[in-house]
């Protein structure tokens, strides 16, 4: 585990960036939930909308329509401990957008803290984002078949434990996404995370391949 890659954005930083209009905030909850209330100036991209066609060309059109170019900082949030937000963030990274992080907490906790919300949909101008696919962060089925034969590869199933017990890829280690969350955040402390990984035989020197249900 290293400190070189920023994964989350804290609440105070996001509030400051929203005031400065220096960030694009993406709410990946369902449209009805978004319309009821959301973090100010956030745009809505439900995960189901993204997954209906996540071809590179279509994702690029969605990104452009959300007013995101190559230089736009993006913060993604959900109300499911980062499970949905991380899938959207990963997709942005896959098409070549490097400046994307997850809000460190859930929307429910944001509201419980009495922080700002509104029900307005911001007016967004289209932008042009380039397409630079990062094939190194996607493990294809062919790659997985060969990787499973190596001792330095660990396959992690992030679905709920029941889903894992019903069926999973042979050799996969169960690590449900909710296990990584704290009471008020989408991730535990680094110390807690290390204990979780150590208990499952997951070490930082191995190549990690994860999968979920989407």
Image (cartoon, grey):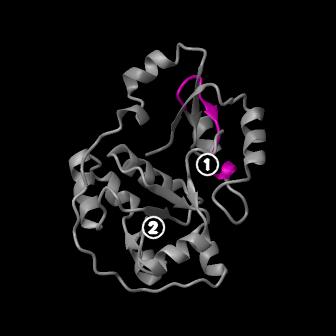
Q: Are marks 2 and 1 in contact (CB under 8 Å)?
A: no
Q: Residue at x 21, y 48 (%)?
A: 57
Residue 8 shown left or right of residue 23 in the figure: right
Upstream in the sequence, badge 2 or badge 1? 2
| Residue 110 x/y as whole percent | 61, 75
Give the vertical position of 56 relative to 43 (above or below): above
- Which residue is denoted by mark 1 in the rendering? 177
The picture quadrant where one finds residue 64 is: bottom left
Q: Position of residue 22 (x, y in %)?
A: 42, 72
Is 33 a magenta residue? no
| Vertical position of residue 69 compared to residue 177: above or below | below
Q: Is 42 on the left or on the right of 81, as rendered?
A: left
Q: Is residue 71 visible?
A: yes
Q: In the rendering, at what x and y percent does residue 111 appear?
A: 60, 80
Residue located 41% across and 50% down the image: 98
Q: Which mark is residue 29?
A: 2
Q: Quadrant of residue 1?
A: top right
Name the residue nearer the viewer: 88 or 126. Answer: 126
How far apart are labels 2 and 1 at the CA level? 17 Å
Please give the label number shown on residue 8.
none
Q: Do we see residue 38 in this rendering?
A: no
**SS of the residue under disc 2:** loop
Q: Quadrant of residue 65?
A: bottom left
Q: What span is colored magenta in the figure?
A: 168-180
């Amino acid at each position: 585990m290293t400190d070189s890659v920023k994964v989350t954005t804290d609440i105070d930083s996001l509030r400051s960036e929203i005031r400065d209009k220096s960030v694009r905030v993406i709410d990946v909850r369902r449209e009805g939930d978004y319309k009821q209330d959301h973090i100010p100036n956030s745009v809505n991209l439900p995960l189901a909308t993204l997954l209906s066609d996540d071809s590179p060309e279509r994702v690029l059109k969605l990104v452009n329509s959300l007013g995101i170019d190559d230089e736009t900082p993006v913060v993604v949030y959900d109300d499911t401990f980062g499970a949905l937000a991380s899938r959207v963030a990963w997709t942005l990274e896959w098409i070549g957008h490097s400046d994307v992080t997850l809000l460190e907490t859930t929307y429910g906790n944001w509201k419980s803290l009495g922080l700002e919300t509104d029900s307005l949909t911001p007016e967004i101008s289209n932008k042009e984002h380039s397409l630079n696919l990062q094939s190194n962060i996607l493990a294809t089925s062919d790659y997985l078949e060969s990787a499973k034969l190596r001792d330095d590869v660990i396959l992690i199933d992030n679905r709920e434990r029941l889903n894992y017990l019903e069926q999973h890829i042979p050799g996969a280690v169960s690590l449900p996404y909710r296990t990584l969350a704290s009471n008020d955040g989408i991730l535990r402390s680094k110390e807690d995370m290390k204990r979780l990984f150590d208990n499952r035989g997951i070490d930082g020197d191995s190549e990690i391949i994860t999968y979920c249900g989407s």
